[in-house]
Image (cartoon, rainbow, N blue to C red):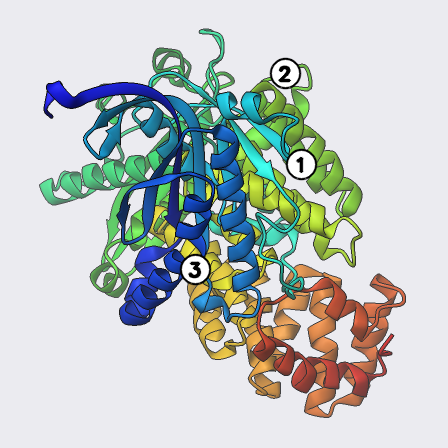
Amino acid sequence: MNTDIVSRRLAAIVIADVVGYSRHMERDDTGTFARLRLIRDEVVDPAIVSHGGRIVKTAGDGLLAEFTSVLAALRASIQIQRQMAARNHDLPEDERVYYRIGVNLGDIIVDTNDIAGDGVNVASRLESMAEPGGICVSSAVREQIHGKLDVNFIDIGEQHVRNIVRPIRIYQVRLEGLATPPTAAPRFQSRTGRQRRWLVAGATSALVAVAAIGLLLPLHRPSRTPADSPPAMSIAILPFAAASESAADAQYAEQLTNDISTNMGRVREATVAVPTQAFAVTGKTIDVSSVGRQLNVRYIAEGEIRRMGEKLAVTVRLTDARTRKQSWSDRRDFDATTLMTNPDAVQIRVTRRLISALTNTEIQRAAHDTASAHPMDLVLRGYAMQSAEPGVNGVREARKQFEAALRLDPNLVLALSESVWSYSEELQFGPNPERKVFQQKMDALSGRAVSIDPQDGAAWAARAAALGWLGRWDEALSANERTESLYPWAVGVLVWRAWIMISMGRPDDALTAAQSAVTIDPPGGGDPQLLTCKSYLYLGRYDDAVAACEKSAGLNNSWVDQVYLTAAYAQKGDMTKARIAREELLKLQPGYTIERYRQTWYSGSQAFFDLVEKHLAAGLRKAGIPER
């Protein structure tokens, strides 16, 4: 940098970036380049220039601009987002382009035609916090603009962002039709409360199922607790023992311990003792209370491997360090073929089961420890409330606990994510006048969750759900894939993928994902079976649909299963069983109609509606379910 021509000044900085640029380019690089060039010529550049701005530099997917007026900078940004919303309105989803925009007022360094400095860095962080189609501004911008434009600012609090030491207070700009593309509300396949629990492990009882939620939607990191009170969800994985004196077995046990510790460490709401500390107790007579105090954890996990001919037996125990009581134990035998063809099967199985057991135990503890007001305990208590009172009331009571946790710790990703799921669950119960408000909240909460911790797999799971309610299925699928990369052991990734595929009108792909989930041990109760049932129904394979729907209805005992079972029986031609299933459905959901199905469950594709009409609605009509 030539210091002779460097100067500083106060400026309004705008940074805009195209959402999903790499995905657009991968799909159609020539078409994407042409569309972005046209958008620059017709929308972005004219908005900036007409408001007195200067485009400093551009990249393939974004640009940096400066303005002498904050008011002009925000007006230009709003014009861009409004025109892009209108432009996207009639385009297919895969051709729509969304910008994120950040606006800051700050000090910049000017070097010939380039600018840099803290003001630019903050604008870049604001852009990364914005929702697709949205704008985020700093507190300095909000103070300058307040009352001068007909816009609303939503305070999302002080945020710690990458490469900036101090927290930044960030505001979202809210305009009608700005953050969410102005399309008709897409149809969405109902995702029940238990479905999010698939991410961690399959659950067989209601309480265990709720327990798995905790892993599903993890948090940023537990808040500090007093020194004499270990954090919630804290655990030490002690070295697994080898029953034989074989050096190979000892090495396998050590590797298994390391793998499980690594997996557990990726669960963001859990606090896992450093493996080297846990290994320090190897070979000693274990006093779990002493180890718990030493490592400041609530629970101790121990295990053993034992060769039994061609099989490997793996035993795991979870013990409460304070009470010395064993909370859970599990044994699984793996045959030689499994160990050879799927060498990760052992560590994945143990991780999944241990996560479920830890969360289940912590839910029970938090439910009884009503005096605790720690944010994590409030979330766990919310799970317990939802288990105790299924239905809308339970969901709402649970959400109160999640919201209370956020008041204490606004960056608790677990609470943000669980709030998303609470809105999703309430919507699935039927037509809801608050639908648009709920969708907006889910969008904002999940976006904030992934921005706080982009490595949190469960936050991405919540993000996928929010995008699903918005009908942005390609983005939902990307979020689902991100979840899988972070939580490779999670059953729910496959189940949620099946829901996305069905909602996109792709039941063949949905069946592949659902059947993969069914084969995983444990398979997550009846939810993978329900997805299998739906996939077969929409493929017109009615005999297979009946078999899968009967299994899911037996496992889930839910009215949702009866909807598909009724249609499958009728389409197969078994009207006696169709009437029985219909009566069970109407007993659980009096007055149920085909129109209610359409109003409640959302999908963004016409292909999905065609499948519904041909297979599900037609079957329900045959069984005597009224249209309205």
Q: Say few, some or many: other residues with alpha carbon within 10 Å of mark 2 (under 14 / 14 to 19 / 20 or more).
A: few
Do labels 1 and 2 touch, CB within 8 Å? no
Measured from the top left, where is residue 263 in percent x and y? 33, 40
Q: What is the three-letter code of the residue carrying label 2?
A: Ser
Q: Residue at x 69, y 83 (%)?
A: 613
Answer with left or right where residue 163 lies relative to residue 565. left
Image quadrant in which you'd find residue 279: top left
Q: Say few, some or many: other residues with alpha carbon within 10 Å of mark 1 (under 14 / 14 to 19 / 20 or more).
A: few
Circle nearer the N terminus (1, 2): 1
* For discs 3 and 1, the disc positioned in front in the rendered view: 3
Image quadrant holding the C terminus, namely bottom right
Measured from the top left, where is residue 575 in percent x and y? 79, 88
Circle nearer the N terminus (3, 2): 3
Q: Which residue is mark 1?
A: 150
Q: Residue at x 52, y 63 (%)?
A: 88
Q: Give the SS element for disc 3.
A: helix
Q: Which residue is mark 3?
A: 42
Q: What is the three-letter code of the residue carrying label 3?
A: Glu
Residue 451 shows up from this direction: no
Q: Taking 15 as reference, is 228 above or below it?
A: above
